[in-house]
Structures are given as structure tokens and as C-alpha cells.
Image (spheres, rainbow, N blue to C red):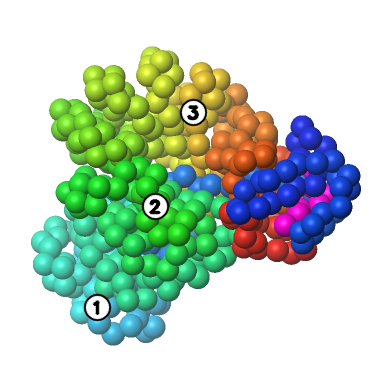
């Protein structure tokens, strides 16, 4: 197959020949007569296809069916939205809402508030960052969990409860995932890193082969299963799905006030939650390395990032840090020296700028340091953490470039990167002979002001068209 009249950075107008899922040749546009099918791009800009390097695939697909409470400014508003959804509740299943941002509320969650509106229907309200949930007594009874007066669960307890609730729709979740993945070509997406909390490798063994590339993460609780499989990072699972990284969550999140920090949160003695002690993290890194699993370490607070870098330094193992949201100058330099990568989600910055001001105000210049990471030579990749933010790489690219949205002034604009850099951080391949034919043709030039709504006219994954407006 030939993509004719493509505009490629550094190469001008070219024809791109594709064979067996890879780029077979690049030639000046119209210079030879093709022997294959031709698709004329009409001078459209051709870029490497985009990756989202941090997604919770099942949670993302299921969340689209949940009650959206992101706009609620307090517990009473959330309760009203849940009450309105109760008549449509499916018998036997909990009513689940998503998008709680209690870190910005004036009032605190109360289990009794949810008990009053739904005494017999289980209700779970999941935070926008996925690190906490607010539930009623009926949900506690369903799961056999003792809930205190707040009804709140945080970190591991919340992850476990949310995973059990998701499993109640497992019979239809795979179909929802298939529908959601089929739509990704519309945004130029060719690959995802799936960091779902269940056994994602086993799930992708069971599911239909995906239309995009999938790297399925492994959590510590699934290391024994990983050892039995003998599958290393990069090994095939099913079609375009492969084994991904070893994911270890070492601390919490800013929105839940559990990110592990050097300094306490304002008005408290609480520094956040350290989920994995340093010595245990080192043992996990070593075991993962023995199994051939590249580590991806969740660290958001500055103290959590420091401890993650300590573990990388002591073990000599390389990998990447997921989020790296609060990073001191010293640790940024260490990260570069140790050659540890950073998987970051720029849209979080725009969602969390109020939270940064409220809880990390004295250290705001250490937060969301995209430009500094790139300037230090650190291997940076971009993602969404979907469903925390929408699975749309153009939102991440726009946030990295403009540091703003909705007419707000740019936030710490010195940390911005240019469009070419942001596109590079969002792709794994190049437009060159021998590279995978994972490509996207744009409907307009990627200027900063149009990135969030960038039209994509063609997407190819391994040479197969997954989306076309041509």
C-alpha cells in the first residue's frame, strides 16, 4: 500500500510505501509508479501514531457508564446527582458515580448522607483520581466492609473495593472495552499502556485481539502468575497485546491528600501515605528484574519520588516513574543521572492547579515540571491516566505546550515544551524505513491554539487503517 502526497517533517512531500505492517520505502511524491493500492493524502501532515502511556483500560471503559459528578462542588450536590440516577439503577448492581473532587469541597463526605438517599441500594462514588471512594452502608454490606461515619475508603482499600464493584459487570465490560478501543483511531491513537488493577495480562489473553497496541501491566499481587507464565516485558499475549511493565504504587495522590511528601499538608501533621516501604520496593524491583519485567513506579509526592530514586540507585535497575508530579531540583538531577524515565500526564496539571495552590503552594515550582524534565535529558512520555482525564493524547499535547485551557492564563509557562517536542513525547516510532506503520494524518497543521480539537483524517496501526475521513 502507498500513502501518496504526505507531508512529513524534514522530508517534505513524500510517498510512503507500506508492506507487512512496516514502512518499506519513502520517496519524493509522485516520483515512481506504485504497484500497490494508493491512498492520496493530498498534502496532509503525516505523523507517527500517538500512544497513551498510562491508562486503566477496564476502569476507563466502565466509567463511561457511571454517574458523572465532576462538576459537583460539595457532597450535597453529589448526593442529588446520585438520587436522580436511582430510578434508572439496574437491580442487583451498585449505583456508581465517578469524578468526586473532595479536596476542593467546603464540606466533608458523610456515609449518612448517602444512606438517607439510598438506604437499600449500594452506592459508590469514586474520586476523580481513583485513589479514594465514598460509599453508603448498603455498599459496605454488599462487600462485607466496615465503613466509618464518613463512608470513605482510601488507597489500597478503595482500589480493592472498586475492583470488586467493577467485577460485577465483567460479563459486559469486555464488550464495552472493545467499543471504546474501536473509537481511538479518531484521535490518532495507536497504542496504550494498560495499568488496570486486575490481572491485565490474563484479561488480554481472554479478550479479542485489540485494534491498537496494548502493553499490559503487572502488579505485585500478580507476580506469582507472571513467574508461572514466564512472560517478560515485550513478550506477545494476543495479537497486538504484549506484556508491559511491573507497576508498583508507592504513594497516593494529591486530590486524596495521600501523595507522600517531605512536608505535611497544611494544617496537619500528615505527610501522606507511603504504600510500599523502601526495602520492600527494592525487593520488588529485584524480583521484577529476575522475571524480565521493566518497572514503572507510581510516585507523586516529592518524598515518594526521592524514595523511588533511592531504590533505583541501590538496585542499579532502570525503569520509569509514573506521574513524578512533585520533584525537587536535586531529585530531577538524580533522575537524569540514573537514566530513569518519567511517564507524566499533563492534563492533570490543569485539573489540579487549584489543588497545588491549596496543598503544595510553597512548592508549586516543583510541580508538573515537564520542560525541566525534557531539558535534563530525561526520557519523558505522555499519557492521560484515563479515566482520570479523557483518553485523548491531543489534550496532553496541548497541556504540555500551552499550560492552559478554557482561556485561563498559562500555569508556570516556563515549563512548556514546543509542539514538535510534545508530539515526539507522545509517539514510540518514527517515519522511517523499517519502522512500524503506526501513522496518523492530520486534518490541519498542529498549531498550539488548535491542539485540543486537532482533526485526524487517517490512522493506521501496523499498516491497517483504523480510522479514515479521506
Which type of secondary structure does the marked residue at label 3 adopt?
loop
Among the two numbered marks 3 and 2 on one chain, the one whose residue lies closer to the N terminus = 2
| Disc 2 target residue | 236
Residue lying at the far front of the rendered structure: 35
Quadrant in which residue 111 is drawn? bottom left
Taking the spot 61% from the left edge, 42% from the top edge, the residue there is 435
Among the two numbered marks 3 and 1 on one chain, the one whose residue lies closer to the N terminus = 1
Q: Which residues are magenta?
A: 1-7
Among the two numbered marks 1 and 2 on one chain, the one whose residue lies closer to the N terminus = 1
Which type of secondary structure does the marked residue at label 2 adopt?
strand
Camera-side mark, 1 or 2: 2
Would you say the residues marked 3 and 1 are in contact, meaning their CB atoms lie under 8 Å apart? no
Is 17 above or below relative to 319? below
The N terminus lies in quadrant: bottom right
3D distance between C-alphas at marks 3 and 1: 47 Å
| Disc 3 target residue | 379
Task: Determine if the magenta segment contains residue 82.
Answer: no
Judge left or right: residue 24 versus residue 164: right
Taking the spot 50% from the left edge, 36% from the top edge, the residue there is 381
Front-most of 261 and 223?
Answer: 223
Taking the spot 23% from the left edge, 65% from the top edge, the residue there is 164
Main SS, magenta region, reads: strand
Say few, some or many: other residues with alpha carbon within 10 Å of mark 3 (under 14 / 14 to 19 / 20 or more): some
Camera-side mark, 3 or 2: 2
Percent position of residue 412, x then y: 56, 28
Which type of secondary structure does the marked residue at label 1 adopt?
loop
Is 292 above or below relative to 145? above
Task: Determine if the magenta segment contains residue 4.
Answer: yes
| Disc 1 target residue | 121
Front-most of 14 and 65?
Answer: 14
Say few, some or many: other residues with alpha carbon within 10 Å of mark 1 (under 14 / 14 to 19 / 20 or more): many
Amino acid at each position: 500500500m502507498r500513502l501518496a502526497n504526505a507531508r512529513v517533517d524534514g522530508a517534505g512531500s513524500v510517498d510512503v510505501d507500506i508492506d507487512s505492517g512496516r514502512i518499506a520505502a519513502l520517496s519524493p511524491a509522485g516520483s515512481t509508479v506504485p504497484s500497490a493500492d494508493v491512498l492520496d493524502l493530498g498534502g496532509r501532515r503525516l505523523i507517527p501514531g500517538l500512544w497513551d502511556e498510562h491508562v486503566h483500560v477496564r476502569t476507563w471503559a466502565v466509567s463511561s457508564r457511571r454517574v458523572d459528578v465532576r462538576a459537583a462542588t460539595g457532597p450535597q450536590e453529589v448526593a442529588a446527582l446520585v438520587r436522580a440516577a436511582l430510578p434508572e439503577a439496574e437491580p442487583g448492581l451498585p449505583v456508581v458515580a465517578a469524578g468526586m473532587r473532595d479536596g476542593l469541597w467546603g464540606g466533608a463526605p458523610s456515609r449518612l448522607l448517602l444512606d438517607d438517599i439510598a438506604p437499600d441500594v449500594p452506592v459508590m462514588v469514586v474520586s476523580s483520581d481513583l485513589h479514594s471512594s465514598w460509599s453508603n452502608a448498603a455498599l459496605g454490606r454488599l462487600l462485607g466492609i466496615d465503613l466509618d461515619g464518613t463512608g470513605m475508603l482510601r488507597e489500597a482499600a478503595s482500589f480493592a473495593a472498586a475492583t470488586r464493584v467493577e467485577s460485577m459487570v465483567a460479563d459486559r465490560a469486555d464488550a464495552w472495552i472493545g467499543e471504546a478501543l474501536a473509537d481511538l483511531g479518531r484521535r490518532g491513537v495507536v497504542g496504550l499502556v494498560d495499568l488496570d488493577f486486575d490481572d491485565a495480562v490474563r484479561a488480554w489473553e481472554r479478550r479479542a485481539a485489540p485494534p491498537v497496541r496494548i502493553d499490559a501491566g503487572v502488579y505485585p499481587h500478580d507476580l506469582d502468575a507472571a513467574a508461572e507464565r514466564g512472560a517478560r516485558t515485550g513478550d506477545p499475549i494476543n495479537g497486538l497485546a504484549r506484556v508491559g511493565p511491573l507497576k508498583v504504587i508507592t504513594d497516593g495522590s494529591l486530590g486524596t491528600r495521600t501523595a507522600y511528601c517531605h512536608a505535611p499538608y497544611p494544617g496537619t501533621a500528615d505527610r501522606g501515605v507511603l504504600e510500599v516501604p523502601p526495602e520492600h520496593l527494592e525487593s520488588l524491583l529485584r524480583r521484577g528484574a529476575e522475571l524480565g519485567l521493566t518497572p514503572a513506579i507510581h510516585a507523586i509526592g516529592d518524598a515518594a519520588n526521592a524514595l523511588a530514586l533511592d531504590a533505583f540507585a541501590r538496585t542499579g535497575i532502570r525503569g520509569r516513574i509514573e506521574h513524578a508530579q512533585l520533584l525537587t531540583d536535586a531529585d530531577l538531577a538524580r533522575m537524569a543521572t540514573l537514566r530513569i524515565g518519567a511517564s507524566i500526564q499533563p492534563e492533570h496539571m490543569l485539573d489540579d492547579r487549584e489543588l497545588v495552590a491549596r496543598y503544595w503552594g510553597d512548592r508549586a515550582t516543583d510541580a508538573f515540571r515537564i520542560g525541566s524534565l525534557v531539558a535534563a535529558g530525561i526520557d519523558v512520555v505522555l499519557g492521560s491516566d484515563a479515566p482520570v482525564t479523557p483518553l485523548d493524547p491531543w489534550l496532553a499535547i496541548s497541556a504540555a505546550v500551552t499550560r492552559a485551557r478554557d482561556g485561563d492564563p498559562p500555569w508556570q509557562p516556563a515549563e512548556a515544551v514546543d509542539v514538535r517536542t510534545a508530539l515526539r513525547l507522545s509517539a514510540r516510532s518514527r517515519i522511517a524505513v523499517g519502522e512500524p506503520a503506526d501513522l496518523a494524518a492530520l486534518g490541519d497543521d498542529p498549531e498550539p491554539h488548535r491542539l485540543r480539537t486537532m482533526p485526524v483524517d487517517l490512522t493506521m496501526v501496523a499498516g491497517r487503517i483504523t480510522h479514515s475521513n479521506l
